[in-house]
Image: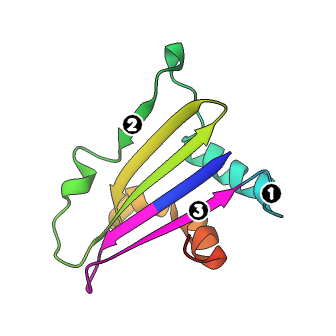
């Protein structure tokens, strides 16, 4: 499974991408468990790709310095993406995964 997280915005307006292959990462099983807990591994009906925005319009959250994230998981031909602003409750469930990806360093 390939997990890619892209962050843009923030005070400096920078963009960074983080990537991990859970098959070769030493803690790949833990990363997969984090994804399952966040609901990103749920396969959509019919196998079609699923895109989810946290909240009514999470990518349009207000605040000039907010970081905006897109997390994509590719697993066995299925691709799931979630987008959110790093603010409030929706971002909290993603924090453990984002900390793990940041610790591994940018892609």
Name which of mark 1 and mark 3 comes first in the sequence: 3
Check the image and name the residue furthest to the bottom: 12
The numbered mark at residue 19 is 3
Which secondary structure, mark 1? loop
The one of 29 and 56 positioned closer to us in this rendering: 29
User: Are discs 2 and 1 less than 8 Å apart at CB?
Assistant: no
Residue 14 placement (x, y as % from top left): 32, 79
The answer to whether residue 99 is left or right of residue 62 is right
Q: Residue at label 2?
A: 51
Above-or-below relation of 4 to 54:
below
The magenta segment is: 6-21
Identity of the residue drawn at 83% across and 64% down: 26
Identity of the residue drawn at 28% across and 79% down: 10
Q: Nearer the viewer, mark 3 or mark 2?
A: 3
The numbered mark at residue 24 is 1
Residue 13 magenta: yes
């Amino acid at each position: 499974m390939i997990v890619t997280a892209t962050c843009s915005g923030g005070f400096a307006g920078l963009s960074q991408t983080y990537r991990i292959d859970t098959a070769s990462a030493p803690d790949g099983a833990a990363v997969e468990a984090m994804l399952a807990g966040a609901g990103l591994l749920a396969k959509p009906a019919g196998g079609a790709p699923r895109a989810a925005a946290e909240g009514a319009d999470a990518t349009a959250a207000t605040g000039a310095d907010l970081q905006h994230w897109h997390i994509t998981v590719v697993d066995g031909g299925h691709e799931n993406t979630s987008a959110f602003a790093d603010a409030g409750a929706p971002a909290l469930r993603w924090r453990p995964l984002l900390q793990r990806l940041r610790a591994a360093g940018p892609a």
